[in-house]
Image (cartoon, grey):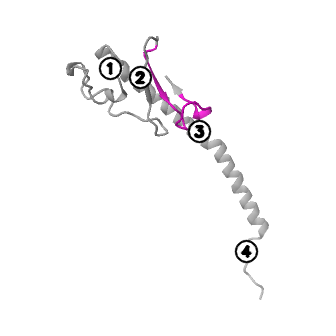
Amino acid sequence: MKNSRRGFTLIELLVVIVILGILATLYITQIMPKGEKAKWDLTAVQMTTIISALDSFNLDNSRYPDTLEDLVVMPNYVKPEKYQIGGYLKEVPVDAWGNKYIYRRLTGAQKRYEIISQGADGREGGEGYDADIVK
């Protein structure tokens, strides 16, 4: 009677490991960047929503808010009849990486404010998906 137990050879196991390594590399280089691009795009859309809320606040109050929180909760410097019922945003959003947006009111410039997401790394500057998004 022959031994009917048969297992994988070392060569077969190495081939499977190499194939899995190649598939993992393809995933990391092809799929992962698409996820970061989606986060980048989502952040840009959120920033457009914030800009719309800022402009609505300005139309109602003849000025831009001091902070983004003023779009959610009526600040003391605004008359109640000039503040949109329910606020201009339901909550202060964070970017797709979970970081707070930076809102700066500008003076003496043609642009009245800027909204900044510090990108994937959450720090100023950077390149690629780590770069700041400024609107």
SS at mark 1?
helix
Q: Which mark is nearer the camera, 4 or 2?
A: 2
Residue 5 within the magenta-colored segment of the rendering: no
Report how far apart the C-alphas of labels 2 and 1 lie in the structure: 10 Å
Q: Residue 48: x percent and y percent?
A: 44, 25
Front in this rendered view, residue 63 or 29: 63
Q: Is residue 125 above or below residue 7?
A: above
Report how far apart the C-alphas of labels 1 and 4 lie in the structure: 71 Å
Q: Which residue is mark 1?
A: 57
Sooner in the amino-acid sequence: mark 4 or mark 3: 4
Do tag 1 and tag 4 residues touch (Cβ < 8 Å)?
no
Q: Residue at x 68, y 47 (%)?
A: 26
Report how far apart the C-alphas of labels 3 and 1 lie in the structure: 35 Å
Do tag 3 and tag 1 residues touch (Cβ < 8 Å)?
no
Sooner in the amino-acid sequence: mark 3 or mark 2: 3
Q: Which residue is mark 4?
A: 7
- Residue type, numbered disc 2: Ile
